[in-house]
Image: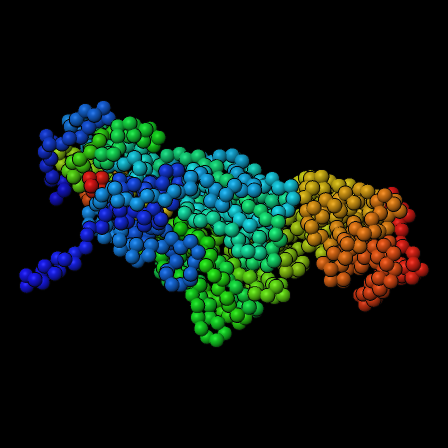
Amino acid sequence: MIALIAAAALTVEARVSFNDIAPIVWRRCTTCHRPGAIGPFSLATYEDVKRRATQIKIVTARRIMPPWKPEPGKGDFESERRLTDSELEQIQRWIADGAIEGDSKDLPPMPAQPAAEAWQLGTPDLVVRMPEAYTVAAGGTDVFRTFVLPIALPRARFVRALEFRPGTARVVHHANIGVDRTRSSRQLDLKDPEPGYVGGMVPDARYPEGQLLGWTPGQAAHPVPPGTAWRLEPGSDLVVQLHMQPTGKPETLQVSVGFYFTDEAPSRTPLGLRLGSETIDIPPGARDYVVADRYVLPVDADVLAVQPHAHNLARRMEAGATLPDGTTRWLIAIDDWDFRWQDVYRYKNPVALPKGTAIAMRYTYDNSDGNARNPHHPPARVVWGQNTSDEMGDLWIQIVARSAGDAAVLADDIRRKSHAEDLAAYVKLLREDPGNPLRHDAVGNLYLEDARYDDAIAEYRASLSLNADSAPTHYNLGFALSMRGRRDEARGAFEQALRLDPEYAQAHNNLGAMLQLAGRAGEALDHFRRAVALRPDNVDAQINLAQLLSAQGRAREALDHFEAALTLRGDSAQALAGIAWIRATVADPSLRNSEQAVTFAERAAAATGRRDLSVLDALAAAYASAGRFDDAVAIVESGINLATAGGLDAAAAELRQRLILYQRRQPYRQSNFL
Amino acid sequence: MHWFTVLAFSSLTVFDLDNRAIDPFKAAAGARATVFLFTATDCPISNRYAPEVQRVYRAFAPKGVRFFLVYPNPADTPDAIRVHAKSFGYAADALRDPKQELAKLASATVTPEAAIFTGQRLVYHGRIDDRFVDLGLERPAPTVHDLADALTAVVAGVPIAHPATQAVGCFIADFAR
């Protein structure tokens, strides 16, 4: 017996000291918990850590810290912050052993941390910040506010990374980030006397195509996967919805966002696939309400990242894929959803899923009083909505078609899916709130996207009968009417929009288009000019103005506006063809440039698949101007066939006149071009 | 039961911000009740309670309740406490309890935690309200205001419904390590 005890005693290991666990703390905690960084206190020295030992014991054992929600083995993610089992065991043993310091001489050197105020990705190419600081009150409930950050960008750029900096780090609990190419967000900001506005993002503020942008404390900044940079248009606003948590004293913050650009155009465009429900309706007291959705891939695709999103009633989240051969793969599982720690999870390696794979998600919700996070006490009915007292259930999946040729098929399929869900959701909202003109507008806009113009017209008219003072509603009504060919009524609607908002650039543009079709070119020109003056970044207005100027023979002015359009949208076929037409046919030799005309017209023809008559006309004129009459003849002949097949007799007749000219080996010259 | 705890004042070594040892119970003589609010300069949970503490203070100080902020962390120096109390807008007098003796007498285990004494009796100790359910789990808003309810009972001279509750926050025991 004595020998046994002695042997057992020999196996007792030395007590774990801070020297043993310091590297774990520095790697896992100190990145956020250090002076000036996001963590609310420092965890760098022995004194710091010892003073929180009991708290650390509890929050690490329960996996509250470091904050990492996905369950292990169900998705292999980048920048995983979860403690390994052996790291956790070491920390627990250190505390159980008395949280001793050990011999400080043996403490390994602390690795240098980048300065808390340094950009993780290096100096950004462009920094945008909130125009004014915002002060969060000392107490009260969490604050949800959206801020509009204008982006000073002279030309479109490709973005390879964004880095979010919260300013006063400890107030911001998370951020959703979108880009608004309209002025919708700014208008809401203007109406709210304080910086930003109360509430969430408007539909016009959206993720750039296929990007999942967000920020959570501790999140590492990530460049996009190679070849997937996204295009940022000039005139866009960055829109940042902040979830701010009062700290006990007033806090002033001024968020900034760093942009990192690349000249490399994307070789593939990821898409945002949304699974979930927008018709959530949870009875009070329900403990196991389920949202489930699935989507079958129409093509081979790679999943790059996922972002689960719900509010405070969601408890468990699961998502996975069932491949056509029956094998299954986890995409993500979160057992104890916490709205405050929502994040974008990027896979270390893209998850390759073949055509026919079913992607499925299932979230469960607890709307009982047993859920401490329930926003209603006592529990109340909770429906879908953007406010945190409402509920959501989305799984955003960043996905890209394996083959470039399949990209359009996947994009169309995904758009159809989310559009159908949006329509169902907004029709439901309208049914419950039929006296709200905004609900009619929302449904009308969705009908518009579906080309259901008569249904859209009915909704806009219903909206206007409830509130006749909405300029955007008059504008949208005008647009829907114009698509149905009801031009006089459309013109009236655009005029009404402009009476309510004389600086409504898009309404000037569309009214101009209606006037031009009515043969009132002079008035049309005035409205196009006004549209361009108000919004020089409006590509459509630039092109409309340029085309009208071109038709009136004002070549030099027309070129200026086509070129402005091309700066805004480098692949605009209309701008390319417009420039080509002038450069090929202008009488003034100092403006003529046959070589550029050919290059531009060929690009325009390629972009339109040689199915656009004006582009073909420009291409033929360019060839003729360059002396390539055989090519010109071939193109005009294909144009004549196209026009004849489409029953466009007038266009066919005009092209036949060009054909005669080119067969005589003469270029076409616009004598009236100035 | 807690509210029959009888205190041995003479052994207490708590200090004001000028490092003078004081007996807070003597200082509070004549008050209808004395409230000790245990806090720390760098505990995010107790800091978040500053506006609520101020609200309770404003509601009950005029009713004869004496409030003290108590800093049980020996690392919280008088200067650090002055800065802290100013930036969080605390109006109550601050005490240092570097050996956690007052915390022990008040059965306080975390910051923030409140203790109410009437004379020599500990009549309430625990949370300020139920906003924090646990570390990492909080309600959007409190549903029970335990400290204010207890003080309302004390002022009305009726028994306190829940004389001991579980507070959530930063552990005082770790300050003593």
On the image, which quarter does residue A112 sit in? top left
In this view of the protein, can residue A457 be seen by the observer? Answer: yes
Judge left or right: residue B34 versus residue A285: left
Q: How is the image coloured?
A: rainbow
Judge left or right: residue A470 versus residue A21: right
Q: Position of residue A494 (x, y in %)?
A: 71, 46
Residue A644 drawn above or below residue B5: below
User: Looking at the image, which residue is at 44% across and 45% down?
Assistant: A243
Pick the residue in front: A16 or A43: A16
User: Looking at the image, which residue is at 59% across and 58% down?
Assistant: A269
Residue B93 drawn above or below residue A82: above
Judge left or right: residue B48 versus residue A641: left
Q: Position of residue A415 (x, y in %)?
A: 58, 61
Q: Position of residue A184 (x, y in %)?
A: 59, 45
Pick the residue in front: A573 or A415: A573
Quarter of the image with the C terminus of chain A is: top right
Residue A498 drawn above or below residue A392: above
In this view of the protein, can residue A653 be seen by the observer? Answer: no
User: Looking at the image, which residue is at 62% across and 41% down?
Assistant: A153
Quarter of the image with the N terminus of chain A is: bottom left
User: Looking at the image, which residue is at 49% across and 69% down?
Assistant: A358
Q: Position of residue A258 (x, y in %)?
A: 52, 43
